[in-house]
Structure formats: structure tokens, C-alpha cells
Image: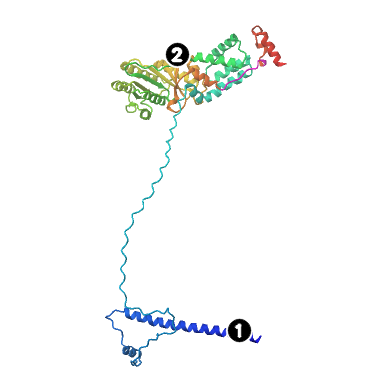
Amino acid sequence: MEPLFVAVIVAVALVSGVVIGFMAGRRRSGVALDETMGQQLEQRAPEHQAPPSPERTAADEGVAPPQPTDVEPSDAPLYDDLDSTAVEAPAEAAPPAEAPAPAEAAPPAEAPAPAPAETTAPAEPAAPPAPLTARERFLARLSRARNTLGANVASIFGRGITEEAWEELEESLIGADVGVEATMEIVESLRDRVKAEGARTGDDALRLLKETLREELSVGDRSLRQRADGTTVWLVTGVNGTGKTTSIGKLAARHAGYGQTVVLAAADTFRAAAAEQLQLWGERAGARVVAHQQGADPAAVAFDGYKAASANGADLLMVDTAGRLQNKTALMAELTKVKRVLEKEAGPCDEVLLVLDATTGQNGLAQARAFLEAVDVSGVVLTKLDGTAKGGIVVAIQRQLGLPVKLVGLGEDIEDLAEFDPDAFVEALFSQVAQEVDIQDVDIEDVDIEDLDIEDLEDASGAGS
């Protein structure tokens, strides 16, 4: 135990001596370094500044100046305990080395050419949709009229061809603005055809009704007359609010699209902003507009309109007249004057078109009769047929007035003013009506036994058993 204790004490003493010696050497090295750095600073001081003398320094400090002593040079190092890493006093400062000339900048490497992007052929623009046919246009626009008349007919014939069904058909046609007199004649004609052809199903009755309506509407010339030479003249009239000026603008756009030169005469000088409205339509359609100030003589505007159209070789002149109530005698006389003055210069008007609102129903017939007496109307433009119109007004105008419906308004777009097509109109009214009547629903009291085939009766009785 004692030898081990003695060995530990000896080891601790040795380590302590090594540490103390190392710290003393480090301290002497620091002093030598400080003196060496001081010598370097003195050598780098400017030559014109002499170092202070030891005497001045000693005097400043209040002590006697040290006396110089002769010291023999020795080859031994000044600090024999320093290692080889001791810093030596540098010689005279060497002049700064010249900075190496910058190497010529190498030309920038050319960026690799981008790979050509794959080019794809531009997509072909979608072809514009094909214009709607007359039947498609009527089918798309007459939904309300179809629901009013077509749906009623479907329910009527769906319950059988009975006397009650005929009465309900009369009520349905009258409610659709066909008119009482026209309805009675149409139903009577239909009953005769059903009996003559032996129709027993709803499909047969519907087919015969559609044929009857086509015959009612296929009377008269529905074309718009135009002159082979010179300027064609159309006089357009009607009650305010029927869409008269708008119909003129749509007609102008359509005929301008045909390549014709169109002139519009703003002879409606009573309604505020009527000329401005026609001017806007003229700009949209590419048609020239002849107008006077508000309150001017409408006959003078119509006359000047024809003069301008004929002088410029225009193909078509349309005269917009003031909307007026049919029960105002003085206003209707003014309309007569416009037509008379215009025809004195231009000859007979090629068309006198009366614009009627289809939603007014039977009131439109009263308007038409008054205008017929004033200006000898040649055809009807029936607007707003796509609205709440019931459809029967077309039949009433044709049958009661003998006037052909030449144009119909089916919407707000320019293309929605279309020529009236009786076949397309009738098909559109009943496009959703497809029903068949069960012969068992027919009341036997309403059937003439002589008209029945025995085989039909046997089939019916067999089906019921």
C-alpha cells in the first residue's frame, strides 16, 4: 500500500513540474515576441522622425539615464529556451510584389442550342353551327304555344273520340285565340273527315287535325315582293309596342346580308327617340337612314327617303311610320296621306306590312281591320310568337282577314325574324303529341253501327275479355 501511495505522489509532482515549466516558457516567449514586434515597428517608422533619446526619455520619467556598456558579441542565441518557431526580426521591407497581370478572359462558352420544340399543327377552328331550318327554329321557339294547344289536344283525344271530346276541342281552339267562328268551322270540317276516313285512334284524329290546319294556313302568297328594276318600296305600319321598328331593323340586316343596298326612312316623327332607334338599327345593319327633326311631316320624310334611295340606286326602301291607335281617325288619315304621297313619286308600294303582337290575341284582329281600311295591307308580320302567344292567332288572321302571315318573330336575334312556314308551324305545335285512343273508351251511343266493321268489333271484344 505504501509503495503505491509513494508512486502516486511522485507522478503528481512530475506532472506539476512539467506544467509549471511549460507555463514559464510560454511567458518568456510572449516577452520575446513583444520585443521583436517593437523592433519591427521602429524599423518601419518614417526616417524624418528620429527616435527619442534615452536621456529625454529618462528625464521625462525622472530617472538617471542608463550608462552604455560594452557587450561582447556572442554566438549563443538570445533565447536559448525558445524552440525553432521563434519569430526572427525581419530584414528591410521588401518592395511589394507586382500584381500579376490579369489573364485574358476566355471567351464565354457558347450555350448549347436548345432542342427544337415539337411543333404541333394548330387546331382547326370549330366550324360554325349550321343555321337552323324553319322546322327546327319553330320547334325551338314555340314551346309555350305547344304546351297550350298541343297538350290540350293530347288529353282530349286520349280519352276517346266522343261527343264530349269534340266539345272540349272547340273550347281548346277558342282558348288558343283561333276565334269562335273559325273554331266552329274547323271542328265541323274535322268531324266530317274523321267519319269519312273511318278514323278510330288518337293518331288518326291528330293527323287529320294537322292536315286541316295546314289547309287553313296554306292560302295566299307569303313571299315578299321586290322589283326586278329600280328601288323596291315597303311601307311598314302598326301600333306602338308591337315591335315594328325592331322588325324593320332585322329585315334591313337580313337583306343587307344578301348584298342589297338598303335605305330606311324614319317617318315616325311623333314618338320620342323613334328616329334614334332606327338610326341604331341602320348602323347595325349597314343601312342608310333618312330622318328629319322630330315633329316633321312624316309624308315629307317618306318622299325624301325614296328620293335618296333612287338617286343612290338602292335596292330596297323601308318606311317606318308612326305607331297609332286604330280608333283614332285623324291618325289613320295621316297614315293614308303618307302612302299616297309616297306612291305618287315611287309608284304602288310593293308591300304594306302590318306588324301585330301575337300576345294580344283577338285584339290584334281589331287592329288589323282598321289598318286594312286605311292602307290596304298586303301581309302581316306577327311578332312575339315565342312568348305567351297561344298560336291560334295565326289561324284567325288567315281565316278571318284573308291576310297571309309572311313573317314571324321567334326571338330577339336578327335570325329570329323568319318567313312563316305553315308546315313547320303545325308540326311544332303538335311535336310532343303522340297518343293513341283505346277504342274501348268510345261511347257506343255515339257510334253509327253501320260504319263499323264486324272484324273490328270482334277484335275489340277479344281484347276486353
Report which quarter residue 323 is drawn in.
top left
Is residue 64 rendered to the left or right of residue 413? left
Q: Earlier in the sequence, mark 2 or mark 1?
A: 1
Res. 241 in view: no
Q: Residue reaching furthest right?
A: 465
| Image spot of residue 227 (x, y percent) | 35, 16
Identify the residue at horizontal 48%, vertical 24% (top origin): 137
Question: Which kind of residue does numbered mark 1 sit on?
Answer: Val
Q: Residues within 10 Å of mark 1 (few under 14, many from 20)?
A: few
Query: What label does residue 187 carry, if any?
Result: none
Q: Quadrant of the N terminus?
A: bottom right
Residue at the far left: name it. Answer: 48
| SS assignment at label 2 | loop
The location of residue 81, given as percent across then percent down, is 44, 84
| Residue at screen point 54% across, 12% down | 185
- 388 w.r.t. 1: above or below: above
Residue 168 vs residue 69, the one in the foreground: 69
Q: Quadrant of residue 234?
A: top left
Closest to the camera, between mark 2 and mark 1, is 1
Q: Helix, strand, or loop for circle 1?
A: helix
Q: Which span is picked out in magenta?
A: 432-440
Residue type beneath disc 2: Gly
Q: Nearer the viewer, residue 352 or 423?
A: 423
Is 435 contained in the magenta span?
yes
Residue at the spot of label 1: 8
In the rendered image of this protein, does residue 102 appear above or below residue 405?
A: below
Residue 220, numbered label: 2
